[in-house]
């Protein structure tokens, strides 16, 4: 699959920002993001999807790196996230002209203009706080721009869509509500990927700023427990936030054209300003054919143009909307 020259030109004029890849977990255990990887099957089903050479080839300007931890034991989760942050900082320090870590939109633009890839930082799973708001402040100081409240198990903040401790009758806990409020204080975006529906709307009601769903599918395009409904999409759009569409066939219900279906559904429900990409590369899910790694991102632009999206809309979808969110919600003290 090779995109046309026209599609490639449209693609390269964008500042593309992916909202979610789990690469730092691998990096903290030796994965070298500076080198090109071609992982063999079955490893390629789980990880080895993002590195600097393929970000460059794929015209991916910036990657939001999601840092996740096993929830049990809880003690040690914060330290594990700090190790992942260390690994990202070490990589950026080794090749400062190739990888720059950023927190603000203008830093992303400047690094992109200088030809470097940009690393942005997010956390997946509020158990990383180990029950302490001080941890959130420490992470914010280290450049973390979003906190995903839940992952695949219940934690002190709330309950997951699916997984250990699931309880659809419960919303956010009182600590979960405190964390959402603290996020807006520290300039950390709230990511509602993986949280159950009640918890989702509990977070919406606290109005912590622009909301993210960093990596998800949508029910209007494919029925799956992992996907969010139109009311949830509208709530995110009303907050000024964005919904990042995942590239996993398990959730989108097909391959590249299905990813496009989900992206177009968000646009249909909430407009061009509410949509983004959230690949979930390196996230232990098999990415779809045609978007199997960062180097294949131009295929998405080709498919979007073929389906009738105008270049300006493609640019918003690929990263313009995320830049707007970063701009409208700077880190505290900035
Ligand atoms: Zn996830």
Image (tube, grey):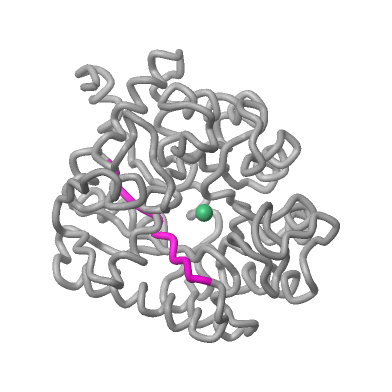
Find out whether residue 306 is within the magenta segment. Answer: no
Location of residue 174 with respect to 162 vertically, above or below: below
Find out whether residue 63 is within the magenta segment. Answer: yes
Among the 4 quarters of the image, the one containing residue 257: top left
Answer with left or right where residue 146 lies relative to residue 200.
Answer: left
**Which region of the structure is painted magenta?**
60-70
Location of residue 9 with respect to 236 vertically, above or below: above
Residue lying at 36% horizontally and 50% vertically, measured from the top left: 46
Which of the pair 283/187 is nearer the observer? Answer: 283
Location of residue 159 with respect to 109 vertically, above or below: below
Residue lying at 47% horizontally and 25% vertically, measured from the top left: 260
Q: Position of residue 184 (x, y in %)?
A: 64, 67
Residue lying at 44% horizontally and 83% vertically, measured from the top left: 79
Residue lying at 36% horizontally and 53% vertically, measured from the top left: 282
Q: Position of residue 183 (x, y in %)?
A: 62, 69
Among the 4 quarters of the image, the one containing residue 255: top left
Which of the pair 47/18 is nearer the observer? Answer: 47
Q: Position of residue 151 (x, y in %)?
A: 58, 61
* Farthest front residue in view: 42
Quadrant of the image for the N terminus? top left
Which of the pair 192/280 is nearer the observer? Answer: 280
Location of residue 69 with respect to 246 vertically, above or below: below
Residue 72 seen by the camera: yes
Is the magenta region chiefly helix, strand or loop?
strand
């Amino acid at each position: 699959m090779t995109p046309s020259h026209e599609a490639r030109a449209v693609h390269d004029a964008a500042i593309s920002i992916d909202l979610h890849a789990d690469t730092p977990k691998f990096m903290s255990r030796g994965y070298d993001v500076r080198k090109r990887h071609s992982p063999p099957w079955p490893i390629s089903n789980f990880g080895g999807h993002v590195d600097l050479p393929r970000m460059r080839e794929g015209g991916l300007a910036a990657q939001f790196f999601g840092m996740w931890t096993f929830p049990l034991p809880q003690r040690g989760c914060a330290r594990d996230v700090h190790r992942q942050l260390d690994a990202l900082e070490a990589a950026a320090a080794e090749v400062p002209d190739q990888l720059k870590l950023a927190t603000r939109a203008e830093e992303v633009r400047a690094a992109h203009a200088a030809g470097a890839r940009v690393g942005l930082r997010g956390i997946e799973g509020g158990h990383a706080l180990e029950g302490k708001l001080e941890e959130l402040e420490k992470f914010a100081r280290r450049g973390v721009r979003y906190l995903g409240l839940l992952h695949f198990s219940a934690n002190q903040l709330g309950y997951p869509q699916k997984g250990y401790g699931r309880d659809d009758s419960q919303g956010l806990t009182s600590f979960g509500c405190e964390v959402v409020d603290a996020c807006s204080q520290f300039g950390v975006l709230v990511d509602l990927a993986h949280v159950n529906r009640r918890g989702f709307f509990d977070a919406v009601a606290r109005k912590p700023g622009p909301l993210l769903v960093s990596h998800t599918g949508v029910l209007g395009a494919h029925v799956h427990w992992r996907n969010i409904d139109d009311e949830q999409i509208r709530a995110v759009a009303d907050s000024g936030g964005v919904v990042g569409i995942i590239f996993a066939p398990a959730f989108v219900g097909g391959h590249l054209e299905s990813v496009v279906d989900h992206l177009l559904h968000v646009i249909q429900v909430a407009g061009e300003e509410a949509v983004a990409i959230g690949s979930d590369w390196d996230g232990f899910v098999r990415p779809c054919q045609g978007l199997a790694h960062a180097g294949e991102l131009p295929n998405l632009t080709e498919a979007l143009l073929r389906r009738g999206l105008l270049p300006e809309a493609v640019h918003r979808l690929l990263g313009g909307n995320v830049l707007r969110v970063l701009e409208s919600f700077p880190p505290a003290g900035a």
